[in-house]
Image (tube, rainbow, N blue to C red):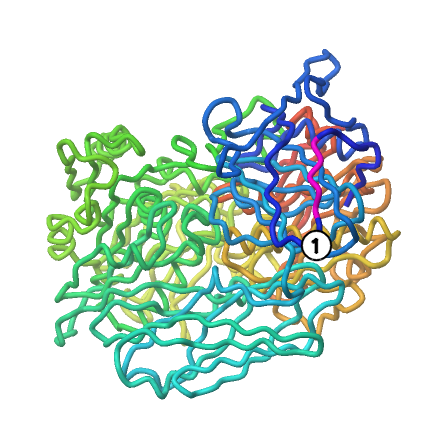
């Protein structure tokens, strides 16, 4: 992606011979306080700025890294790992630091980089994903040159760096498998698992298969392409039909293809239908395999049964979450995954994961729709507050345990979402994160019961967060319970989640049917995240991503609806509960009165705000913004997205976009247990990838898919120039993120663009995978953002409902 030609030999050399299996790097130079990455699109990084602008000098102990014109500087310091080869989390070498290593390889070739406590890694200038949570299973194939190689670690926590000689260049990695449980007497179809394939060769793996064998039964799965010098988590099938007793079974996996073969054994457990188990499914987000855990109902009488959706805390797997609950005789508990133990804090794709699990579990267990409950602990307590406020028509009651309401106040590992800014452009960017602020959505809790549980000695999530919500709910809510457990810390045993009084609270409540709900008080920040409550839906906003509020009351006996709206352009109402073929009077915002009679096979009507008048309208055209495709940039990472790198530029430009696509795929895998197809622009055709979102890397000069997908977009990026309508910016240091609709009714294009190598490098940080981070529809910035922050934003904003630029919804810097 970029070269470090100016970096020559330094004293911290690690000799690496391919006759060795593993080398642990134990001596480094450390640079503290050099960067700030968090839950927003804006980031700063003094070292990366110099690296990208080709001004980074050879690091030496005591040498200063100048970071601005005022001659403020940071200094490199010698650092040594402890006896366990770990750069300690204690003292001065903790978070927010870079570690710089060099070591010598005796010949050119592939290696596996394994790091823990790393946010990202540069290997000879090529950016790779890190392992910030210390999972230990992230093995990254890298290409080493003969002689000295530079490794720069953006460190996080307790950091360890290993270089591993692969025994096989193509292999299976079992340490991060996603596996189903076998439920006896229910194994009448193939099950699905997923495992990582490492490809340390310079050729993509094409036409490879995995053959699974369990209890004598085989199943063969064709694999997707695994790019060169990369890894991919792939799905394989399992035939469990010969398993006839409970217990653990070896499942042999054999990888075969043109150039290599590998074999590994995993263990899968068979259980009775009344025991806990894992259920895998293919996610519509990216086509990857995910799972949820089940604590089934013990009673055979499942009439009017409940469904409990439990969302786990940071660092907790769904399997452990489900195991913390005793079996209930009146309902089934399912624990979603957030796609990873930390994942996305139950926001963004974690939110979608929870909804996918809820939908699958509802179909699988067929609960009484009036007895669906939501609960969770710690980060899952936040997930409970967030999902409860975002989808208030889904729950009979919610029970947040030891949780924090907002990432703006608590933050957790990726930091807090900034609350505001003095800069207009940054304010426009931060608007995209409004959905995360549940305190602004607090009236959405009004329709259902809320049970708040917290230990009063909790030092991880202080009890003040629970008290804050208690005090806020107390101003209006008529059905909430609050309990502090005296002396209890963050986790005080399974009762931290399986609290008897909480489940009794659930048992005493039910969700009302839509026909019984005549009052609506609903707030949303984006119809693309949450549009509907009961019989009313916000389809379009006047100002995208600002809060929309509807307060409506219907009078079935008077054939009328009245209420108020804020920031609503198009409102959808369902009149099915009114007497058929009878006129219904509707008055909104004390404006004109409309009289409507629902006719034909539908009771759905559409109202549009036209200045100070509401008019009867038709359904918005599918090409306009709508809840299925509303923006923002992050929305493009959905619908089984495909990463498309460039081949039409210079060698350096093409390598840059390829490495960026690989880096995003590595990060997506780590953050979201995901997998992505990565293709060259010349291999893209609309017919082949119909119905899928596309992520384009490069610009109009380098990526041939640009003309097909972005010809009509008002934002255009070429070498040395970006235009947005009648505005333009020049230079090779401009980066951009934006989203644009495809020609169909659903899919989008996400664009990671640059006017040159510097501009692409400015866009290299994938902060869009941080849970709750806000990215607008479009954003243009210079490489100088890495040292000057939001001052370097040139353009930020949102398309209007017709996907056109609007001066009122964007901020531009001349």
Task: Residue at the far top: name it.
Answer: 70
Disc 1 secondary structure class? loop
Classify the position of the C terminus by image quarter.
top right
Q: Residue at x 48, y 50 (%)?
A: 348
Which is more toward the observer, 744 or 246? 246
Q: Which class describes the residues within 10 Å of circle 1: few (<14), some (14-19), or many (20+)?
A: some
- Is residue 622 shown to the viewer in this render? no
Q: Is residue 727 left or right of residue 492?
A: right
- Whether 212 is drawn above or below 748: the answer is below
Q: Residue 330: within the magenta?
A: no
Res 306 quadrant in image: bottom left
Which is more toward the observer, 381 or 27? 27
Q: Residue at x 45, y 40 (%)?
A: 547
**Percent position of residue 136, x then y:** 49, 49
**Percent position of residue 756, x then y:** 82, 42
Which is more toward the observer, 103 or 516? 103
Classify the position of the N terminus by image quarter.
top right
């Amino acid at each position: 992606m970029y070269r470090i030609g100016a970096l020559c030999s330094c004293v911290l050399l690690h000799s690496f011979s391919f006759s060795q299996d593993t080398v642990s790097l134990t001596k480094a130079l450390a640079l503290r306080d050099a960067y700030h990455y968090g839950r927003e699109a804006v980031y700063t990084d003094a070292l990366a700025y110099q690296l990208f602008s080709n001004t980074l000098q050879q690091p030496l102990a005591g040498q200063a890294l100048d970071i601005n014109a005022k001659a403020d500087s940071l200094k490199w310091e010698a650092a040594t790992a402890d006896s366990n080869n770990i750069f300690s989390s204690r003292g001065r070498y903790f978070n927010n630091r870079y570690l710089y290593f060099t070591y010598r390889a005796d010949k050119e070739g592939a290696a596996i980089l394994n790091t823990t406590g790393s946010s990202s890694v540069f290997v000879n200038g090529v950016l790779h994903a890190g392992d910030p949570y210390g999972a230990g299973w992230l093995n990254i194939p890298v290409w080493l040159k003969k002689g000295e190689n530079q490794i720069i670690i953006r460190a996080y926590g307790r950091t360890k760096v290993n270089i591993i000689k692969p025994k096989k260049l193509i292999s299976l990695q079992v340490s991060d498998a996603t596996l189903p449980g076998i439920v006896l007497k229910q194994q009448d179809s193939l099950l699905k698992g997923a495992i990582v394939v490492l490809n340390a060769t310079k050729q993509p793996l094409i036409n490879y298969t995995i053959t699974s064998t369990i209890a004598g039964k085989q199943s063969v799965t064709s694999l997707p392409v695994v790019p060169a010098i990369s890894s991919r988590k792939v799905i394989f099938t399992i035939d469990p039909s010969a398993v006839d007793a409970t217990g653990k079974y070896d499942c042999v996996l054999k990888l075969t293809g043109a150039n290599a073969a590998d074999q590994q054994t995993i263990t899968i457990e068979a259980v009775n239908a009344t025991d806990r188990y894992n259920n895998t499914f293919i996610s519509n987000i990216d086509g990857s395999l995910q799972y949820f855990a089940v604590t089934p109902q013990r009673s055979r009488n499942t009439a009017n049964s409940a469904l409990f959706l439990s969302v786990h805390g940071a660092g907790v797997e769904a399997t452990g979450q489900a195991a913390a609950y005793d079996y209930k005789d009146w309902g089934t508990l399912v624990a979603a995954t957030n796609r990873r133990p930390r994942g996305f804090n139950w926001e963004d794709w974690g939110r979608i994961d929870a909804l996918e699990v809820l939908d699958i579990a509802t179909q699988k267990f067929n609960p009484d729709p009036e007895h669906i409950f939501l609960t969770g602990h710690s980060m899952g307590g936040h997930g409970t507050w967030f999902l409860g406020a975002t989808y208030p028509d889904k729950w009979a009651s919610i029970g947040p345990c030891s949780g924090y309401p907002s990432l703006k106040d608590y933050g957790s590992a990726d930091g807090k979402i900034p609350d505001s800014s003095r800069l207009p452009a940054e304010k426009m960017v931060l608007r995209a994160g409004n959905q995360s602020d549940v305190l602004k959505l607090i009236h959405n809790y009004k329709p259902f019961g809320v049970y708040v549980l917290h230990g009063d000695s909790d030092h991880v999530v202080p009890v003040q967060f629970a008290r804050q919500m208690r005090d806020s709910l107390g101003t209006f809510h008529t059905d909430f319970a609050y309990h502090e457990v005296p002396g209890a810390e963050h986790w005080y045993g399974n009762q931290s989640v399986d609290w008897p009084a909480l489940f009794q609270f659930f048992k005493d409540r039910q969700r009302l049917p839509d026909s019984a709900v005549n009052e609506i008080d609903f707030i949303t920040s984006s119809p693309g995240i949450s549009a509907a409550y009961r019989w009313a839906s916000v389809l379009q906003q006047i100002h995208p991503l600002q809060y929309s509020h509807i307060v409506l009351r219907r009078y079935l006996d008077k054939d009328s609806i009245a209420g108020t709206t804020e920031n609503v352009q198009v409102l959808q109402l369902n009149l099915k509960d009114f007497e058929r073929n009878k006129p219904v009077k509707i008055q909104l915002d004390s404006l004109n009165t409309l009289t409507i009679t629902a006719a034909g096979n539908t009771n759905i009507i559409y109202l549009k705000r036209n200045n100070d008048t509401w008019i009867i309208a038709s359904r918005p055209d599918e090409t306009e913004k709508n809840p299925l495709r509303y923006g923002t940039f992050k929305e493009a990472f959905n619908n089984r997205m495909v990463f498309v790198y460039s081949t039409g530029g210079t060698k350096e430009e093409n390598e840059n976009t390829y490495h960026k696509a690989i880096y995003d795929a590595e990060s997506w895998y780590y953050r979201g247990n995901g997998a992505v197809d990565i293709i060259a622009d010349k291999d893209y055709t609309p017919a082949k990838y119909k119905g899928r979102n596309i992520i384009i890397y490069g610009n109009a000069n380098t990526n041939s898919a640009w003309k097909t997908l972005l010809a009509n977009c008002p934002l255009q990026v070429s070498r040395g120039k970006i235009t947005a309508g009648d505005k333009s910016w020049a230079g090779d240091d401009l980066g951009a993120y934006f989203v644009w609709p495809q020609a169909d009714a659903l899919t989008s294009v996400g664009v990671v663009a640059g006017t040159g190598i510097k501009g692409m490098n400015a866009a290299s940080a994938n902060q869009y995978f941080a849970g709750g981070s806000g990215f607008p529809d479009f954003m243009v910035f210079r490489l100088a953002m890495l040292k000057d922050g939001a001052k370097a934003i040139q353009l930020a904003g949102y398309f209007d409902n017709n996907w056109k630029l609007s001066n009122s919804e964007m901020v531009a810097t001349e």
